[in-house]
Amino acid sequence: MKAVLLGTAAGGGFPQWNCACAPCDGARSGRLASRSQDCLALSGDDRNWWLFNASPDIRTQLVATAALNPGPGPRDTPVRGVVLTDAELDHALGLLTLRGAAGVEVHATAAVSEALHGDLDLRAVLDRYADWTWHDVVPGKPFDLDGGLEVTAVPISGKRPKYTGGSTVDGDWVVAYRVVDRRTGGTLVYAPCLATWPAALEHLLADADVLVLDGTFHSPDEMGVRTGGSHGQAAMGHLPIAHSLPELRRHPGVRRIYTHLNNTNPVLDPDSPEHADLVAAGVEVPPDGTVIEI
Ligand code: MLT
Ligand code: MN
Ligand code: ZN
C-alpha cells in the first residue's frame, strides 16, 4: 500500500488567514513549512487511489501529487472516491471541488451521511452535478476498495460538527479507519479526530504498521494562550499531544505520525522543545506530500 499525506494541518490550514499567532507568523515569513488541511490518499496498486477525507485544499493537493494526476484519457482520473472519518467542514468541503467527476464513490457512516444530507445539504447539491454512489459505512464491518484494500471503521468519538445544531442523531460521528493491503498485509490506521484514548485504539495498534493520528493541539489550553482567546477548554474535542504522546511511547514498533496540526501547535516549529520531545519518542510530523510505503 502507498500512502500520501496530502495535507497535515487542522481546519484553517497553516498559516491560517486570520491568525497572527507565533507559528502562523513563522509560516508567513517562510521560516516554517506551510501545511494544507488534513487529507490522506491511499492505494493498494498505485492505479486506484482513495481519498480519506476531502479537504477544502483538495484541488491544490491533487494538482501537486503526480500519482493523482488525470490520464491517460482526457477525463480519466485515478481517484476512485472518498472515505470520510467525520462530517467536519475541513474534511468534507472538498467534495464540492470534486463535483465535476463522474462515478465517485463516497463511504461514510449513517450519522456523517445524514449531516451531509441535512444541516449541510452537500449531497443534494452534488447529485445535480454527477452520478455518485454513497455507501453506508457500518463500524466493525469490513468493506473493500478497488486496488486491494480492506477497510474497517471503528467508532472513536461522538464529536458532532458545530453546524449540526438541529441534529438529534446519536451515532458514529467520528470513526478511525483500519486499512489493510490484502496482498502484503500492510496495515495503516487513520484517526485524525480523537477526544480521548479509547481502548479500541489499543486493539488497532496491536497489528498496525503505521498510525496517522490527531495531533491538533499540544496542550489543552493552547488556543487561549496563543491567540488571547478563551476557547481552549477541553481542547475542542481533540486529545492534546501532551496526553496522547505517553500512549504512543508504548507502541515503538508502529510508525507514528501526527496530522491535523492546528496552527497554534508548537510542534510545527522544529526548533521547539515540544518537537524535540516527539523526535525523542520516535514520533513524526512529516510535511505535506510525504509518501509512505507500507
Ligand atoms: C475540528 O476538527 O474540530 C473542526 O474541524 C473544527 C472546525 O470546524 O474548524
Ligand atoms: Mn478539523
Ligand atoms: Zn495561528
Image (cartoon, rainbow, N blue to C red):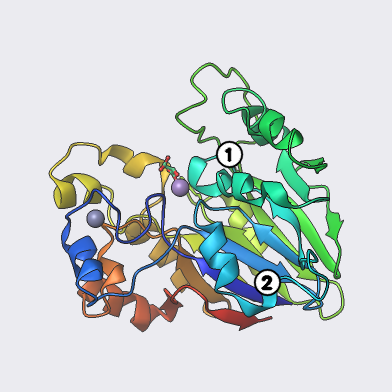
Labelled disc at residue 12: none
| Mark 2 C-beta closer than 8 Å to ligand 2 | no
Tell me where residue 66 appears, x and y as whole percent: 64, 79
Q: Secondary structure at mark 2?
A: helix
Tell me where residue 234 appears, x and y as whole percent: 32, 40
Quarter of the rendering occupied by the N terminus: bottom right
Q: Please, is residue 208 above or below residue 15 in the view?
A: below
Q: Residue at 48% of width from left, 27% of height from top?
A: 163
Residue 285 location, quadrant: bottom left
Tell me where residue 92 appears, x and y as whole percent: 58, 44
- Near-viewer residue (23 or 252): 23
Q: Secondary structure at mark 1?
A: loop
Left or right, 228 with respect to 200, comes to left
The residue indicated by pointer 2 is 68
Specify the farthest residue to the left: 228
Q: Is residue 89 visible?
A: yes
The kind of residue tagged 2 is Leu
- If you read the primary sequence from the N terminus, does the residue marked by circle 1 or circle 2 appear first? 2
Q: Write down which quadrant ligand 3 falls in.
A: bottom left
The kind of residue tagged 1 is Ala
Q: Residues within 10 Å of mark 2 (few under 14, many from 20)?
A: many
- Which marked residue is nearer to the observer: mark 1 or mark 2? 2
Left or right, 1 with respect to 265, comes to right
Tell me where residue 261 appears, x and y as whole percent: 38, 60
Q: Is residue 137 visible?
A: no
- Near-viewer residue (66 or 189): 66
Q: Residues within 10 Å of mark 1 (few under 14, many from 20)?
A: many
Left or right, 266 with respect to 98, comes to left
Q: Please, is residue 132 above or below residue 24 in the view?
A: above
Left or right, 280 with respect to 172, comes to left
The residue indicated by pointer 1 is 87
